[in-house]
Amino acid sequence: MEFFNVDVIRDYGGALLHGLLMTVILTFIVITLSLGLAIPVALCRMSPYRVIRAISSFYVEVIRGTPLLLQLVYIYYVLPSIGLNLSAFFAAILGLTLNYTAYMSEVYRGGILAVPKNQWEAAATIGLSKARTLQRIILPQALRIVTPTLGNYFISLFKDTALASVVTVQELTFTGQIISARSYQYFTIYTVTAILYLSVGYPAALFVRWLEQRTQHGFRSRSV
Amino acid sequence: MIGLVDIRKRFGNHEVLCGISETFATGEVTCIIGPSGSGKSTLLRCINLLEQPTSGEIIIEGEIAYYDIVDGKARLHAEARISKVRRKLGMVFQDFALFPHLTALGNVTEGLIYGLGLEKGEAKAIANHMLARVGLADHAGHYPDELSGGQKQRVAIARSLAMSPKAMLFDEPTSALDPELVGEVLEVMKDLCREGMTMIIVTHEMKFAREIADRVIFIDQGAVVEEGPPVEVLDAPRHERTRNFLKRVMR
């Protein structure tokens, strides 16, 4: 019995590449949305208004306290019962974005708090409003602090998109499951699937490491 | 130009400032001295509301600044109004507090563009002039971590001066500097003094205080112990506490 069946790849290679494409698309849409949305969520968590703080904290804690798998299933299978029908693709986007936004907001919050207090004070003495200070002085420094951590989230999101298969999105893992069940070529299909993940994931990891070094190198030391 | 009326500041149960009243005239150079923990930095930071006094009033150019007392409670003014008063007071920090992600020029233009709303070109022209004034014309493109401590502090002074303040507050401006770099910062401050700038300086540099100050205020345990011209306070202190303090720092 041969383990690796080249014919299977010829027959199903296209489908697997299509699955990989879906995985990459999911990753990029979700990372873009989360990177942007997590900033306002982080700011809400630090709001002087208690109600805003409470709502945003509730959201973050619910997300952090339940499995991502359950969140996806809930959005796709439970929300229709209250009249909210989402396609599999949008359900996956929504679930992954809600999840990653919550985690990334905590990263941003940590980054913002890590900027020394004297930066706020110096900005206040030269007439910058709080909002301006945040935009011009605090966030640019916080972003450099959180870049390595966000890079790691990017890598783990790439793999977490596999969970979208539970809501029937035909990304790479789900495609592999379907094809291998049909052809019984588990060894070949899942090996190729793993290689496809690695062929994108490893360069992405290298890119994140490069970004990390670049921001560390370019990080102008705090003026202390 | 600056008046403090019975300023008190409490952190928890600890009273850091126990009712300080002072006036600072236009063009006057005042040095505030005292042991560490005496409250001198806190007092300075109350003047531009980096610390909010527990009670008391601050008067800037004849107007009650930052907050009104309503039913015994301080009600803060709107942010824009506070900011307008703050801009009249330049502040120089012990640890420079430069913006590390901006060049020397960027540090100086920041307030001009985003605080005062000037055009970028105009802001750059002013900033270059200010950097030249503190002797750093050819360091405009350098980032803070490419500058020495003395140069950083001079950029910080230029950043404040660019806002055309009515007075300058200095919070131990040379305390974080290597000894050989102290001189260049003090020189810039002496220039400001010669130009008639109103200055309030918290400092440990007694020699400098004697040279530059019109008036020296000695603070201990949150209260003014004694004040007067340097020849009186520094050379012939009347109070035992002042004498003890000076004996310790002069050694």
Image: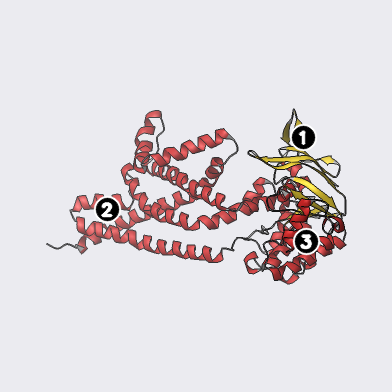
* Labels 2, 1: front one: 1
Label 2, label 1: how many angstroms apart (C-alpha)? 70 Å
Q: Secondary structure at mark 1?
A: strand
- For mark 1, what is the residue? B68
Residue A176: assigned label: 2
Label 2, label 3: how many angstroms apart (C-alpha)? 78 Å
Q: Residue at x 74, y 55 (%)?
A: B245
Q: Are marks 2 and 3 in contact (CB under 8 Å)?
A: no
Crowd rating for badge 1 (residues with CA inside 10 Å; few <14, some 14–19, many 20+):
some
Q: Nearer the viewer, residue B105 or B184?
A: B184
Q: Are marks 2 and 1 on the same chain?
A: no
Q: Amino acid at mark 1?
A: Asp
Q: Chain of mark 1?
A: B
Q: Nearer the viewer, residue B41 or A75?
A: B41
Label 1, label 3: how many angstroms apart (C-alpha)? 37 Å
Q: Secondary structure at mark 2?
A: helix
For residue B1, say whether it is visible.
yes
Crowd rating for badge 3 (residues with CA inside 10 Å; few <14, some 14–19, many 20+):
some
Residue B206: assigned label: 3
Q: Residue at x 40, y 52 (%)?
A: A157
* Labels 2, 3: front one: 3
Q: Amino acid at mark 2?
A: Gly
Residue B112 location (% of width, % of height): 75, 55
Q: Are marks 1 and 3 on the same chain?
A: yes
Q: Amino acid at mark 3?
A: Met
Q: Residue at x 75, y 65 (%)?
A: B185
Residue B179 location, quadrant = bottom right
Residue B67 location (% of width, % of height): 75, 37
Q: Is residue B4 left or right of residue B153?
A: right
Q: Secondary structure at mark 3?
A: helix
